[in-house]
Image (tube, rainbow, N blue to C red):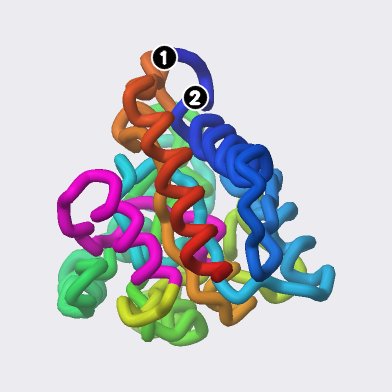
Amino acid sequence: MYGRGVVDMKAGLATMMMAMAAIKRAGIKLYGDLVFAGVIDEEAKSEGTRAYLQQGTLPDAAIVSEPTSMQICIGHRGLEWFEFTFHGKTVHGGKQKEGINAIQKSMLFINKLESELIPEIEKRTNPVIGSSSMNYGLIKGGTQPSTVAGECILQIDRRWIPGENYQEILREYQQILDELSTQDSQFKADFKVMDVSYMDDTYIHEAMYTDPDQEIVKASAKAIHKLTGKDALLGSFPAWTDGGLINYYGKIPTIVLGPGDLSSAHSKAENIEISQLVPAVLIYSMIAIDYCK
């Protein structure tokens, strides 16, 4: 099946709803409440999940149906997008010595990241999730070749493992900027969380980790084994999900478990194998029945 959003994550939402309908139609009594939360804005500010967490009554466990090919993911990294702005002085390219090239100043910062911070970040690992990371996603500066660049913007994707402190992440960047400004009186720069992902109520895109001994993990593994005859593998999800907010701020044991392969998400050829849909409905149904017994 092909279509925009079919794997990320219409299939997950649809199979969850069908699981609830199947339980209802079968007349099975659950000894607990089964809640479906179809929320908006996970790709940016997670406004739907933030509102849900603030409404009061919260569940004892949660499943996020992002595409995992129905493998249980008990964790993923935290995420934030930072924008660094380097300030220079614009002059004609023929008088470049009289100007301050913001692009060159950004290079000083990148060199510091490469030689000092990134090697340190990559040492921080989690046995399930892997290592922390940083990616240069966008850089732009100047207006034309014959003009010294008066400004340069660098956007970075920073991902961290559970246990890393967000304020410490901010401090690490600020420390490098401060060191460079001390070494070079013409170095002027600042940074912020990008507007597209900034959440103004103290929430951040936190990491997620759920202990394998939690009942939601056990119930999910049991359902997968019962349906497939295979032991469930516990792993991590490569992207960020609202599970980070649910798990960290809601203190709710959370897993990511859904039909489909993430590799086709956000692409023109986004797709899901139809053969994954019915098993997903059955697995979700069995998890709910077992957990709410």
Residue 237: image quadrant is bottom left
Total count of labels: 2
Residue farthest to the right? Answer: 55
Rendered residue at 49%/75% (across/down): 253
Q: Is residue 20 above or below residue 266?
A: below
Q: Is residue 235 part of the magenta span, yes or no?
A: yes
Whether residue 237 sits left or right of residue 207 in the image: it is left
User: Where is residue 62 shown, x and y percent of the image?
Assistant: 55, 64
- Which of the numbered marks, if any, corresponds to residue 1? 1
Q: Position of residue 71 (x, y in %)?
A: 29, 51
Q: Where, quadrant-wise, is the N terminus in this rendering?
A: top left
Q: Quadrant of the C terminus?
A: bottom right
Return the x and y of residue 207 as percentages of the image width and height: 44, 70
The magenta span reads 216-244
Tell me which label, 1 or 2, sits earlier in the chain.
1
| Circle 1 residues within 10 Å: few <14, some 14–19, many ≥20 | few
* Cα gap from disc 1 to disc 2, whole angstroms: 8 Å
